[in-house]
Image: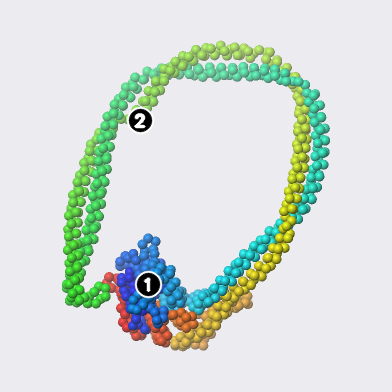
Amino acid sequence: MRIDSIELDGFRSFGHEVIDLTGVHLASVVGKNGNGKSKAFVEAPIFALTGAKTRGSLDDHVMSEPEQREECSVAVVFSPDSQQRYKVTRTRSIRGRGKSTAELVREENGQWVADTTGADEVTARVKTLIGADEELLLVTSIIAQDEAKAFLSKTPAERLEVLGKILSLDKKYGPYEAHWKERASEAKLALAKAREDVERYTAECETLAEREELSEVERNSRETAQARLVKLEREHASIREAAEKAKAAVPDVDEVKKRLRELEDRKGGLIHRQSALSQERQTLQARIADKDELTAKLARRPDVILEIASLEEAEKSDAAVREKRAVLAEQQRSAEEAWDAALADGKKKRAERDVRAAKLSALCDREAGIRSAANPLCDRCGQPIADEAKERTLAQLGAEIEQLGEEVEQMDAVLGELRDRAAERKQELDAAKEAISALPPYAFDQARYSQLKRLRDELDEIPAKLSTIAAAEERVLALNKEYKAVSDELADDAIWDGIDEGRAVLAGAEEKRQAWEAAALGVGEAERHVFAAREAVTEAEKALAAHEEAIKMLLPSREKLETAKAAETEQAAALEDAEYLKKAFGKNGIPLMIVGNVVADLEREVNELTGLYDGGMHVTFETTKETKAGDTRDSLEIIVDRNGYPSRAYSGFSGGEKYRIASCVRLGLALLMARRAGARISTLILDEPEGLDESGQAHLVKILEHLSDRFERILLISHHDFLKDALPSHITVSRGDDDMSRVEVES
């Protein structure tokens, strides 16, 4: 893949820039840190080609400073081969929840024609055209800042996966792995079903054996229960006969009990009546004691009536004041709202007028700058403006300045009117507040009024209470007579003698009654035992019938169990075959063998590059590693030998040496991808090499010159002056006074 141009619009700090790379073969991209070198040549092409981000979020691509944009776009013209050119345009909008769109066109007869639309569809199409996704691009073609060591920082297993992607092994062997994976899943389900059947029928056969055993137990239980029932029925008949004899010996004491109960009820009634009479008399006497107090309270009623009437007259007077206060409060509220609205309108119009005034000033400054400049330059391209274009620009600016001047004058007039209106509303508000303050205070005392009404109601009830007291005095006299009569009746000895005689008769018969009741309890207990025995016989017969029915239903399970065992054996063999073939076509099978075969090619490419550094170093890729248990596992360990010193792992080197090793490995991957995997990668972009002294930088230039005949376009992003001057072409990224980033290509 060769990148021919990059067009940026509202991307990061770029307003609108078109970067034409058609004349560039080997160039340095230079500029101060923060000017946007990585954004233009790493983040932008990655976003356009894959829709992915190298850091932050996709919304961060949209310009926020020095201007606030709602959308950005990146267009990249690229050639996947020497025959065809394509242009991919991808946008990012921050409106709402954020959305990305994409469009791919191809060049036919000098014209761009539609190819693919839709973010996901374009991403998939570009991936097919260039033979690489975001991860492979960052590994092999567009090597971002801090990404040079990313491949070496991966685990050995992850490195193997990257090589597999470069070689497109997932495309070649993935369908076979998926087929046998599906066959294995089907066999697992069938095996699980067969095992479920075996478990189910085994359980049913075990249940069958249990039922057969229980059936015999229930037969024995039924016979035992029947024998016990016969024995208990005989015992029940004997106990019932003894109870009937005990009942006959109990004398008839019902009449005695009835008479005793009547006497005791009479005694209890008299005592209760005596207590009630005494309590009623006490209550009435307490009520009579309140007579003098009630009479004194009743004398206050005329004064209370007069004070209530006075307060009611004050309430009527306060109602008019309250009504006037409500009207004035509503006038105050309306005046406040009108005043606030006038102030808000004035503030809004003032802001709009200031915006237009600022814009008018800027246009005037611009017009003056163009008129005063001998050779004015275009704001976008930086080229001199022709006289005709200058006149058109000045005419357009003059028209805009005149229009804005008129708008500012009109808005000044409107602001004057709004100030007058606000002053009128303020006068109305002050008048309403003054009228409210002039209103007299309220004279009505609600609490005192409520108190007096309650007191009046209480006094109105006193005559009725006095009448009740008079009736109570008469009732007390009658109660005194009735109390004496009840007391005399209670003193009669006949009541007490009758009670003693009845209790003596009952005492002798109680022992016999208790004996009969005990016998009756024995009869009930015997009946319960008989009933329980009958229930036991019934339950035993039901259980026996249930077991026999279950045995009849479970008998076929023995034959079904043998069939399920045969199916289990067959599906286990099918699963074993499928798992073997799935593993053979998986990443640790045939693809791993192929990766092992190309490691030697990668090692040769890498060491060819490392040999260009002074002192030399040799990189070895070990595809297996011995575990602590003594086994071996697939791996991609990286061992480095330098200047005859003992071999060390990559992690044991310094920062500059790590970058040299990592950059050689990443460049070796790019060469491997272009040569062995069929990926169409012919553009190489390296971003900000770190940790290199001038010697390391010089050798990096030597490597890039060595690779210049293998890549159509190589870009080295750096802020180092040495790297800027060491390459034949320069691309400068700078920031102007407006804080916008700009790109200048010098072929």
**Residue visible at 75% across and 22% down in the picture:** 507
Q: Label 1: few (<14), some or many (≥20) within 10 Å?
A: few
For label 2, the residue is 447
- Provide the secondary structure element on which disc 2 rests: helix
**Residue visible at 41% across and 81% down in the picture:** 81
Would residue 524 appear left or right of 309 to someone viewing this image?
A: right
Screen quadrant of the C terminus: bottom left
In the picture, residue 204 is in which quadrant? Answer: bottom right
Which of 718 and 381 lies nearest the eye of the viewer?
381
Is residue 146 among what the camera can see? Answer: no
For label 1, the residue is 114
Q: Position of residue 612 (x, y in %)?
A: 44, 87
State the residue lying farthest toward the front. 109
Q: In the image, is residue 129 above or below residue 544?
A: below
Which of 36 and 208 lies nearest the eye of the viewer?
208
Q: Position of residue 703 (x, y in %)?
A: 42, 85
Which of 16 and 150 lies nearest the eye of the viewer?
16
Screen quadrant of the N terminus: bottom left
Q: Position of residue 335 (x, y in %)?
A: 24, 44
Q: How is the image coloured?
A: rainbow
The disc placed on residue 719 is none
Which of 407 and 650 lies nearest the eye of the viewer?
407
- Provide the secondary structure element on which disc 1 rests: strand
- Label located before the other in sequence (2 or 1): 1
In the picture, residue 233 is in which quadrant? Answer: top right
